[in-house]
Amino acid sequence: MSKTILVTGGAGYIGSHTCIKLLDAGFQVLVLDNYSNSSPEATRRVQQIAGKTVAAIRGDINDAPLLDSIFSSNDIHAVIHFAGLKAVGESVAQPLRYYHNNVSGTVVLCDAMQRAGVKNLVFSSSATVYGDPASLPINEAFPTSATNPYGRSKLMIEELLGDLHVSDPDWNIALLRYFNPVGAHPSGLIGEDPADIPNNLMPYIAQVAVGRRERLNVFGGDYPTHDGTGVRDYIHVMDLADGHVRALEWLNSQAGIRAFNLGTGIGYSVLDMLKAFEKACGKTLDYVISDRRPGDVASCYADPQRAASELDWSARLGLEAMCADAWRWQERNPQGYK
Protein backbone atom coordinates (compact mmCIF):
# COMPACT_ATOMS: atom_id res chain seq x y z
CA MET A 1 0.00 0.00 0.00
CA SER A 2 1.56 3.29 -1.06
CA LYS A 3 1.74 6.04 1.54
CA THR A 4 -0.51 9.11 1.28
CA ILE A 5 1.13 12.53 1.53
CA LEU A 6 -1.02 15.57 2.28
CA VAL A 7 0.35 18.49 0.23
CA THR A 8 -0.97 21.87 1.42
CA GLY A 9 -0.74 24.44 -1.35
CA GLY A 10 -0.24 21.54 -3.74
CA ALA A 11 -1.67 23.39 -6.76
CA GLY A 12 0.90 26.19 -6.47
CA TYR A 13 4.12 26.54 -8.41
CA ILE A 14 6.46 24.44 -6.25
CA GLY A 15 3.63 22.27 -4.91
CA SER A 16 2.46 21.10 -8.35
CA HIS A 17 5.97 20.14 -9.46
CA THR A 18 6.54 18.31 -6.16
CA CYS A 19 3.31 16.35 -6.68
CA ILE A 20 4.77 14.94 -9.91
CA LYS A 21 7.95 13.83 -8.13
CA LEU A 22 5.89 12.26 -5.31
CA LEU A 23 3.74 10.32 -7.79
CA ASP A 24 6.87 9.19 -9.66
CA ALA A 25 8.30 7.95 -6.34
CA GLY A 26 5.18 5.83 -5.69
CA PHE A 27 3.38 8.00 -3.13
CA GLN A 28 -0.32 8.78 -3.20
CA VAL A 29 -1.01 12.51 -3.15
CA LEU A 30 -3.83 14.47 -1.52
CA VAL A 31 -3.79 18.21 -2.35
CA LEU A 32 -5.35 20.85 -0.10
CA ASP A 33 -5.45 24.32 -1.70
CA ASN A 34 -7.68 27.39 -1.45
CA TYR A 35 -6.59 28.52 -4.96
CA SER A 36 -5.92 32.09 -3.77
CA ASN A 37 -2.74 32.17 -5.87
CA SER A 38 -3.05 28.95 -7.89
CA SER A 39 -5.38 27.11 -10.25
CA PRO A 40 -7.19 23.74 -10.13
CA GLU A 41 -5.95 23.36 -13.72
CA ALA A 42 -2.43 22.78 -12.37
CA THR A 43 -3.59 19.61 -10.56
CA ARG A 44 -5.41 18.39 -13.67
CA ARG A 45 -2.19 18.78 -15.65
CA VAL A 46 -0.15 17.04 -12.95
CA GLN A 47 -2.43 14.01 -13.44
CA GLN A 48 -1.94 14.26 -17.21
CA ILE A 49 1.85 14.30 -16.86
CA ALA A 50 2.06 11.55 -14.23
CA GLY A 51 -0.73 9.35 -15.63
CA LYS A 52 -2.05 8.95 -12.08
CA THR A 53 -4.93 10.44 -10.14
CA VAL A 54 -4.51 13.12 -7.50
CA ALA A 55 -7.21 13.73 -4.91
CA ALA A 56 -7.74 17.47 -4.42
CA ILE A 57 -9.76 19.36 -1.81
CA ARG A 58 -10.56 23.07 -2.02
CA GLY A 59 -10.04 24.46 1.45
CA ASP A 60 -7.96 26.50 3.83
CA ILE A 61 -5.35 25.48 6.40
CA ASN A 62 -7.09 27.74 8.94
CA ASP A 63 -10.23 25.55 8.72
CA ALA A 64 -9.72 23.19 11.69
CA PRO A 65 -12.93 21.10 11.20
CA LEU A 66 -11.97 20.52 7.55
CA LEU A 67 -8.45 19.41 8.56
CA ASP A 68 -9.87 17.04 11.20
CA SER A 69 -12.14 15.47 8.60
CA ILE A 70 -9.23 15.11 6.12
CA PHE A 71 -7.06 13.34 8.71
CA SER A 72 -9.89 11.12 9.98
CA SER A 73 -10.93 9.95 6.52
CA ASN A 74 -7.44 9.42 5.02
CA ASP A 75 -4.47 7.39 6.24
CA ILE A 76 -1.92 10.20 5.95
CA HIS A 77 1.73 9.35 6.47
CA ALA A 78 3.24 12.86 6.29
CA VAL A 79 2.47 16.45 5.37
CA ILE A 80 4.39 18.69 2.98
CA HIS A 81 3.37 22.22 3.91
CA PHE A 82 3.58 24.76 1.05
CA ALA A 83 0.40 26.76 1.77
CA GLY A 84 1.58 30.30 2.39
CA LEU A 85 1.50 33.83 1.05
CA LYS A 86 4.89 34.73 -0.40
CA ALA A 87 5.24 38.28 -1.78
CA VAL A 88 7.72 40.43 0.14
CA GLY A 89 6.22 43.82 -0.89
CA GLU A 90 2.67 42.67 -0.19
CA SER A 91 3.74 41.40 3.25
CA VAL A 92 5.00 44.88 4.16
CA ALA A 93 1.64 46.38 3.13
CA GLN A 94 -0.49 43.61 4.71
CA PRO A 95 1.44 42.14 7.66
CA LEU A 96 -1.64 40.89 9.55
CA ARG A 97 -2.81 38.90 6.53
CA TYR A 98 0.63 37.26 6.29
CA TYR A 99 0.81 36.40 9.98
CA HIS A 100 -2.77 35.08 9.98
CA ASN A 101 -2.30 32.89 6.91
CA ASN A 102 1.30 31.74 7.33
CA VAL A 103 1.80 31.57 11.10
CA SER A 104 -1.74 30.99 12.44
CA GLY A 105 -2.46 28.59 9.57
CA THR A 106 0.57 26.50 10.49
CA VAL A 107 -0.54 26.39 14.15
CA VAL A 108 -4.01 25.16 13.10
CA LEU A 109 -2.42 22.57 10.78
CA CYS A 110 -0.02 21.26 13.44
CA ASP A 111 -2.85 21.09 15.97
CA ALA A 112 -4.84 18.91 13.58
CA MET A 113 -1.78 16.75 12.84
CA GLN A 114 -1.19 16.28 16.56
CA ARG A 115 -4.81 15.24 17.15
CA ALA A 116 -4.48 12.72 14.31
CA GLY A 117 -1.08 11.41 15.47
CA VAL A 118 0.61 12.45 12.18
CA LYS A 119 4.02 13.83 13.15
CA ASN A 120 6.07 13.83 9.94
CA LEU A 121 6.32 17.28 8.38
CA VAL A 122 8.31 18.85 5.54
CA PHE A 123 8.07 22.63 5.78
CA SER A 124 8.54 25.00 2.87
CA SER A 125 10.83 27.66 4.35
CA SER A 126 13.01 30.24 2.62
CA ALA A 127 16.52 31.66 2.41
CA THR A 128 14.95 34.95 3.56
CA VAL A 129 15.38 33.61 7.13
CA TYR A 130 19.10 34.50 6.82
CA GLY A 131 18.34 38.23 6.44
CA ASP A 132 21.36 40.08 5.04
CA PRO A 133 24.14 37.47 5.45
CA ALA A 134 27.51 38.61 6.79
CA SER A 135 29.40 36.29 4.41
CA LEU A 136 28.89 33.84 1.54
CA PRO A 137 28.10 31.06 0.82
CA ILE A 138 25.30 30.73 3.39
CA ASN A 139 25.22 27.57 5.50
CA GLU A 140 22.54 26.39 7.90
CA ALA A 141 24.51 27.39 10.99
CA PHE A 142 24.36 31.10 10.04
CA PRO A 143 22.38 33.35 12.39
CA THR A 144 18.78 33.90 11.29
CA SER A 145 16.94 37.19 11.05
CA ALA A 146 14.30 38.73 8.81
CA THR A 147 13.97 42.03 6.98
CA ASN A 148 10.22 41.88 6.15
CA PRO A 149 6.98 40.29 7.44
CA TYR A 150 7.12 37.48 4.85
CA GLY A 151 10.59 36.40 5.99
CA ARG A 152 9.61 36.91 9.63
CA SER A 153 6.58 34.65 9.19
CA LYS A 154 8.84 31.86 7.85
CA LEU A 155 11.26 32.37 10.74
CA MET A 156 8.43 32.34 13.31
CA ILE A 157 7.16 29.07 11.84
CA GLU A 158 10.65 27.51 12.03
CA GLU A 159 10.85 28.56 15.69
CA LEU A 160 7.38 27.28 16.59
CA LEU A 161 8.18 23.95 14.89
CA GLY A 162 11.38 23.80 16.95
CA ASP A 163 9.36 24.37 20.13
CA LEU A 164 6.90 21.69 19.02
CA HIS A 165 9.71 19.15 18.59
CA VAL A 166 11.15 20.01 22.03
CA SER A 167 7.71 19.44 23.59
CA ASP A 168 7.25 16.13 21.74
CA PRO A 169 10.36 14.48 20.23
CA ASP A 170 8.15 12.15 18.17
CA TRP A 171 7.80 15.00 15.68
CA ASN A 172 10.13 14.61 12.68
CA ILE A 173 10.48 17.89 10.78
CA ALA A 174 12.55 18.94 7.78
CA LEU A 175 12.86 22.71 7.27
CA LEU A 176 13.70 23.29 3.62
CA ARG A 177 15.21 26.72 3.00
CA TYR A 178 14.79 27.44 -0.70
CA PHE A 179 16.89 29.85 -2.63
CA ASN A 180 15.30 31.09 -5.92
CA PRO A 181 13.09 28.51 -7.69
CA VAL A 182 12.82 28.96 -11.46
CA GLY A 183 12.01 26.93 -14.57
CA ALA A 184 9.10 24.59 -15.23
CA HIS A 185 8.30 20.96 -15.96
CA PRO A 186 9.99 20.00 -19.26
CA SER A 187 6.60 19.08 -20.77
CA GLY A 188 5.63 22.77 -20.77
CA LEU A 189 2.29 21.80 -19.17
CA ILE A 190 2.87 23.30 -15.72
CA GLY A 191 4.95 26.27 -14.58
CA GLU A 192 4.95 29.50 -12.61
CA ASP A 193 1.75 31.51 -13.08
CA PRO A 194 1.75 34.62 -10.86
CA ALA A 195 -1.72 36.00 -10.19
CA ASP A 196 -0.61 39.61 -10.69
CA ILE A 197 2.61 41.45 -11.61
CA PRO A 198 5.37 38.89 -10.99
CA ASN A 199 7.42 39.43 -7.84
CA ASN A 200 10.22 37.18 -9.07
CA LEU A 201 12.72 37.75 -11.84
CA MET A 202 12.22 34.73 -14.12
CA PRO A 203 8.44 35.00 -14.66
CA TYR A 204 8.87 38.73 -15.28
CA ILE A 205 11.53 38.11 -17.95
CA ALA A 206 9.32 35.40 -19.47
CA GLN A 207 6.34 37.79 -19.65
CA VAL A 208 8.54 40.38 -21.40
CA ALA A 209 9.64 37.67 -23.87
CA VAL A 210 6.04 36.64 -24.62
CA GLY A 211 4.91 40.27 -25.04
CA ARG A 212 2.82 40.64 -21.88
CA ARG A 213 5.19 43.28 -20.46
CA GLU A 214 7.17 45.97 -22.25
CA ARG A 215 10.51 45.72 -20.52
CA LEU A 216 12.31 44.38 -17.46
CA ASN A 217 12.95 46.73 -14.55
CA VAL A 218 16.37 45.92 -13.09
CA PHE A 219 16.44 47.23 -9.53
CA GLY A 220 19.96 48.50 -8.90
CA GLY A 221 22.95 48.60 -11.21
CA ASP A 222 25.55 49.69 -8.65
CA TYR A 223 25.89 46.65 -6.39
CA PRO A 224 29.42 45.34 -5.63
CA THR A 225 28.96 42.42 -8.09
CA HIS A 226 30.60 41.54 -11.41
CA ASP A 227 28.11 43.60 -13.44
CA GLY A 228 26.52 45.80 -10.75
CA THR A 229 23.23 43.86 -10.60
CA GLY A 230 22.07 41.64 -7.74
CA VAL A 231 23.36 38.06 -7.59
CA ARG A 232 21.14 35.16 -6.50
CA ASP A 233 21.20 31.37 -6.33
CA TYR A 234 18.61 30.11 -8.86
CA ILE A 235 17.45 26.50 -8.62
CA HIS A 236 15.37 24.54 -11.13
CA VAL A 237 11.95 23.77 -9.68
CA MET A 238 12.29 20.07 -10.64
CA ASP A 239 15.50 19.81 -8.59
CA LEU A 240 13.72 21.58 -5.74
CA ALA A 241 10.77 19.16 -6.01
CA ASP A 242 13.18 16.25 -5.83
CA GLY A 243 14.55 17.70 -2.58
CA HIS A 244 11.12 17.26 -0.97
CA VAL A 245 11.01 13.57 -1.85
CA ARG A 246 14.51 13.16 -0.37
CA ALA A 247 13.39 15.03 2.75
CA LEU A 248 10.44 12.62 3.16
CA GLU A 249 12.85 9.69 2.92
CA TRP A 250 15.07 11.38 5.53
CA LEU A 251 12.08 11.71 7.91
CA ASN A 252 11.58 7.95 7.71
CA SER A 253 15.16 7.20 8.67
CA GLN A 254 15.88 10.01 11.17
CA ALA A 255 14.20 11.50 14.17
CA GLY A 256 14.43 15.17 14.89
CA ILE A 257 14.22 18.59 13.31
CA ARG A 258 16.77 19.76 10.78
CA ALA A 259 17.18 22.69 8.38
CA PHE A 260 18.48 22.16 4.84
CA ASN A 261 19.46 24.68 2.20
CA LEU A 262 18.12 23.80 -1.24
CA GLY A 263 20.21 25.75 -3.73
CA THR A 264 22.94 25.21 -6.30
CA GLY A 265 25.73 27.12 -4.58
CA ILE A 266 26.20 29.21 -7.75
CA GLY A 267 25.26 32.88 -7.98
CA TYR A 268 23.95 34.49 -11.19
CA SER A 269 23.27 38.20 -11.64
CA VAL A 270 20.07 39.70 -13.03
CA LEU A 271 21.84 40.45 -16.32
CA ASP A 272 23.30 36.90 -16.45
CA MET A 273 19.73 35.58 -16.22
CA LEU A 274 18.46 38.03 -18.84
CA LYS A 275 21.19 37.02 -21.32
CA ALA A 276 20.57 33.31 -20.72
CA PHE A 277 16.84 33.80 -21.28
CA GLU A 278 17.49 35.76 -24.49
CA LYS A 279 19.44 32.75 -25.74
CA ALA A 280 16.57 30.40 -24.82
CA CYS A 281 13.84 32.45 -26.51
CA GLY A 282 15.91 33.77 -29.43
CA LYS A 283 14.96 37.41 -28.80
CA THR A 284 16.65 40.54 -27.49
CA LEU A 285 14.71 41.74 -24.44
CA ASP A 286 14.41 45.36 -23.40
CA TYR A 287 15.39 46.38 -19.88
CA VAL A 288 15.98 49.52 -17.86
CA ILE A 289 18.09 49.92 -14.73
CA SER A 290 16.25 51.71 -11.93
CA ASP A 291 16.89 52.40 -8.23
CA ARG A 292 17.64 49.64 -5.76
CA ARG A 293 14.68 48.26 -3.82
CA PRO A 294 14.82 48.64 -0.03
CA GLY A 295 15.71 45.37 1.68
CA ASP A 296 17.48 43.79 -1.33
CA VAL A 297 20.96 42.40 -0.67
CA ALA A 298 23.81 42.47 -3.21
CA SER A 299 24.52 38.72 -3.28
CA CYS A 300 22.95 35.60 -1.83
CA TYR A 301 23.84 31.98 -2.59
CA ALA A 302 23.79 28.71 -0.69
CA ASP A 303 26.26 26.28 0.71
CA PRO A 304 24.32 23.12 -0.24
CA GLN A 305 26.71 20.63 1.42
CA ARG A 306 24.40 19.50 4.23
CA ALA A 307 21.65 18.46 1.78
CA ALA A 308 24.26 16.65 -0.31
CA SER A 309 25.66 14.66 2.61
CA GLU A 310 22.48 14.03 4.65
CA LEU A 311 19.70 13.93 2.03
CA ASP A 312 21.87 12.59 -0.81
CA TRP A 313 20.48 15.49 -2.85
CA SER A 314 22.10 18.01 -5.13
CA ALA A 315 20.86 20.22 -7.96
CA ARG A 316 21.51 18.69 -11.38
CA LEU A 317 19.89 21.12 -13.82
CA GLY A 318 21.82 24.20 -14.91
CA LEU A 319 20.98 27.68 -16.15
CA GLU A 320 20.33 26.57 -19.74
CA ALA A 321 17.63 24.07 -18.66
CA MET A 322 16.10 26.60 -16.24
CA CYS A 323 15.62 29.15 -19.03
CA ALA A 324 14.62 26.68 -21.77
CA ASP A 325 11.96 25.07 -19.57
CA ALA A 326 10.62 28.41 -18.31
CA TRP A 327 10.35 29.68 -21.89
CA ARG A 328 8.63 26.48 -23.13
CA TRP A 329 5.99 26.88 -20.41
CA GLN A 330 5.46 30.61 -21.07
CA GLU A 331 5.41 30.30 -24.87
CA ARG A 332 2.81 27.51 -24.77
CA ASN A 333 0.78 29.20 -22.00
CA PRO A 334 1.13 32.96 -22.66
CA GLN A 335 -1.67 33.73 -20.17
CA GLY A 336 -0.67 31.01 -17.71
CA TYR A 337 -3.49 28.61 -16.78
CA LYS A 338 -6.25 30.99 -17.86
Image: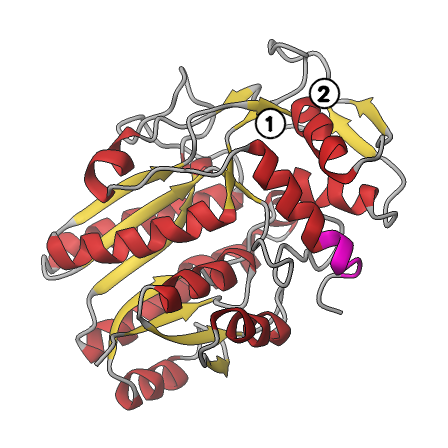
On the picture, is 97 further left or further right than 83?
right
Q: Residue at x 80, y 22 (%)?
A: 289
**Cβ atoms at labels 1 and 2 below 8 Å apart:** yes
Q: Give the magenta part as a residue range.
A: 330-335
Disc 2 marks which residue?
220
Q: How far from the left and from the top, in percent, is residue 273?
A: 66, 29
Q: 188 or 300: which is nearer to us? A: 188
Q: Residue at x 38, y 51 (%)?
A: 242
Residue 74 vertical position relative to residue 163 in the rendered view, above or below: below
For mark 1, give the secondary structure: loop
- Answer whether residue 332 is magenta in the image: yes
- Answer whether residue 68 is magenta in the image: no
Residue 178 appearing in the image: yes
Q: Residues within 10 Å of mark 2 (few under 14, many from 20)?
A: some
Image quadrant holding the N terminus, namely: bottom left
Which amino acid does the dot numbered 1 rest on? Asp
On the picture, is 104 further left or further right than 311?
right
For mark 2, give the secondary structure: loop
Q: Residue at x 67, y 58 (%)?
A: 193
Q: How far from the left and from the top, in percent, is residue 141?
A: 26, 28
Q: Residue at x 14, y 50 (%)?
A: 256
Disc 1 marks which residue?
296
Tally of numbered discs: 2
Q: How far from the left and from the top, in percent, is residue 132?
A: 47, 24
Disc 1/disc 2 C-alpha distance (Å): 9 Å
Which amino acid does the dot numbered 2 rest on? Gly
Residue 164 appearing in the image: no
Q: 84 or 337: which is nearer to us? A: 337
Q: 177 or 303: which is nearer to us? A: 303
Quarter-wise, where is residue 178 in the image?
A: top left
Quarter-wise, where is residue 110 in the image?
A: bottom left
Q: How far from the left and from the top, in percent, is residue 143?
A: 32, 27
